[in-house]
Amino acid sequence: MNWEAMGAIGEIVGAIAVVTTLIVLIIQLRQNTRSMDEANYLQKSAAIDKHAESIGSWRNQFISDENVAKIWCSMRDGKDLSQLDAVRFDNIWVNFVNTQRSNFIRANVVGEPGLARQAVLSVVVELASSDNFLEGWKATRHWNQLVSPDFVTAVEQELKEGSPNATGRAASTDFKRGVLEPFPQDNHD
């Protein structure tokens, strides 16, 4: 066997090694893509679970403590609160907005726009139901703007599109219908 034949055999072996390496890389890439898809699915599932858990936890305070429910309803209905109850309400309100803001951010991170919108609409429904809630929003807006400007923009855009009147109550039946009834799915075709 001469040097040319050995060189040709070496080139064939090298070509086989390159092709084998490419096949292995393609297989690994496909497996990695599947793993990433599964991880994304699990992240979305976890975000949905956390969303439901955080809302349930927030609502549980009304179930487990009648005074909390009375404070919320009194403030919503425009009744005067004692100084202590006003402080309690301020904290309940901040917890509510923070819960929904966190849900909004988490939903956007994992690509769940429906959950993000649900978080926004939860705040908008409360704002539209009470002058006092609207004042609470205005008082905490700056702090929310610092950490989540997209959330503040989304809430205020929904309020604007919902045509709430100056008292903060929904003036438009379309707004009420849009908040209280299911929204049609967006078609991006």
Image: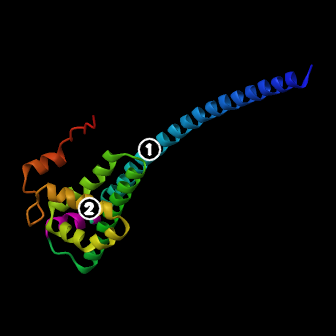
Residue 167: give x, y in percent of width and height: 9, 66
Question: Which label number is shown at residue 155?
Answer: none
Sequence-first disc among 2 and 1: 1
Please tell me whether mark 2 or mark 1 is closer to you in this view.
2
Residue 151: give x, y in percent of width and height: 31, 60
Separation of residues labelled 2 and 1 (CA atoms): 23 Å
Query: Badge 1, how many Cα within 10 Å: few under 14, some, many 20+?
Result: some
Residue 154 lies within the magenta run:
no
Amino acid at the residue labelled 2? Thr
Q: Secondary structure at mark 2?
A: helix
Mark 1 highlights which residue?
44
Q: Which residues are magenta?
A: 68-78
| Residue 140 in view (yes/no) | yes
Residue 7: give x, y in percent of width and height: 84, 27
Quadrant (top left/top right/bottom left/bottom right) for the C terminus: top left
Instruction: Tell whether 26 sits left or right of 131.
Output: right
Residue 145 placement: quadrant: bottom left
Mark 2 highlights which residue?
153
Who is closer to the viewer here, 33 or 128?
Answer: 33
Display coloring? rainbow
Query: Badge 2, how many Cα within 10 Å: few under 14, some, many 20+?
Result: few
Who is closer to the viewer here, 44 or 94?
Answer: 44
Amino acid at the residue labelled 1? Lys
Quadrant (top left/top right/bottom left/bottom right) for the N terminus: top right
Who is closer to the viewer here, 152 or 88?
Answer: 152
Q: Secondary structure at mark 1?
A: helix
Residue at 41% across, 53% down: 106
Which residue ends up furthest to the bottom in the rendered image?
Answer: 83
Magenta span: chief secondary structure = helix
Residue 169 placement: quadrant: bottom left
Which residue ends up furthest to the right in the rendered image?
Answer: 1
